[in-house]
Amino acid sequence: GQRIVSGSADETVRVWSLAGEQLLEMEGHTDWVHSVAFSPDGQRIVSCSDDRTVRVWSLEGEQLQDIQGHTGGVLSVAFSPDGQRIVSGSGGPWGDKTVRVWSAETGEQLHEMQGHTDRVWSVAFSPDGQRIVSGSADETVRVWSLAGEQLLEMEGHTDWVHSVAFSPD
C-alpha cells in the first residue's frame, strides 16, 4: 500500500507515492486510459485504453506487453489473484462488447467471452481466480468460468452497470 497508480484522459499512466510525489509516468497509449491495476505481487501494472490496447508495465516504467485484439476501446482491466492472467472488458458504439482473458506473461489471448450486448464497463476475478464477473451497459451482470463459459446472468439494474466485484469470502 505504498504506491498509487492512476490512468488519465491525458493518455498516461502515473505512479505516485503516498506523499503525493510522482514516481513514474508511462507513455504509450494513444487515447484515454480507462482502468489501471497493480499485479498481486506489486511488480507490474496493467492499463487499458480507448486505443483498443491492454498494456503491461514494469515498476521501472518499461512497457512489457502491448496486448491487442479488442476491436473497440478497452474500459476495464484486472489481474488474476495469481498474477498469471489479465481480464479485460471492451465496448463502445464500434466495440466488440467482449470479455477477454490474456496471459500476463506473453499477451496471448486465452479466452473470449461473448454475450453482452453493449459495452463492458467493469471486470473482476474471483478471489480463487476461477471465475470472472462483468458488468455492462446492457444492464446485466454476468459470471464466467475461467474457460470462458457463461455461468450466470443477473438482471435487475435499470441502467448501465459501471462496477462489479466479488466478496473476499
Image (cartoon, rainbow, N blue to C red):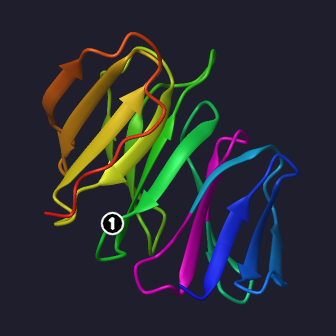
Q: In this view, does 161 lie above or below 82?
A: above
Q: Position of residue 21 (x, y in %)?
A: 84, 84
Residue at 58% across, 73% down: 45
Q: Position of residue 20 (x, y in %)?
A: 80, 80
Residue 65 shown in magenta: no
Q: Is residue 113 above or below residue 104?
A: above
Tell me where residue 158 sits by quadrant: top left
Count of numbered circles in the view: 1
Residue farthest toward the right in the current orientation of the protein: 10
Residue at 21% across, 63% down: 168
Tell me where residue 136 sits by quadrant: top left
Residue farthest toward the top in the current orientation of the protein: 158
Which residue is label 1 attached to? 80
Q: Is mark 1 on a helix, strand or loop?
A: loop
| Crowd rating for badge 1 (residues with CA inside 10 Å; few <14, some 14–19, many 20+) | many
Boundaries of the magenta span: 37-55
Q: In this view, does 43 lie to the left or right of 145?
A: right
Residue farthest toward the front in the current orientation of the protein: 19
Tell me where residue 164 sits by quadrant: top left
Residue 52 shown in magenta: yes
Q: Where is residue 116 in the image (x, y as percent from the top left)?
A: 36, 21
Q: Is residue 100 visible?
A: yes
Residue at 77% across, 87% down: 19
In the rendered image, the quadrant that contains the C terminus is bottom left
Q: In this view, does 112 lie to the left or right of 150?
A: right
- Tag 1: amino acid: Ser
Q: In this view, does 13 lie above or below 95?
A: below
Q: Is residue 31 above or below residue 91?
A: below
Q: Can residue 110 be seen in this view?
A: no
Residue at 55% across, 80% down: 44
Q: Position of residue 69 (x, y in %)?
A: 54, 43
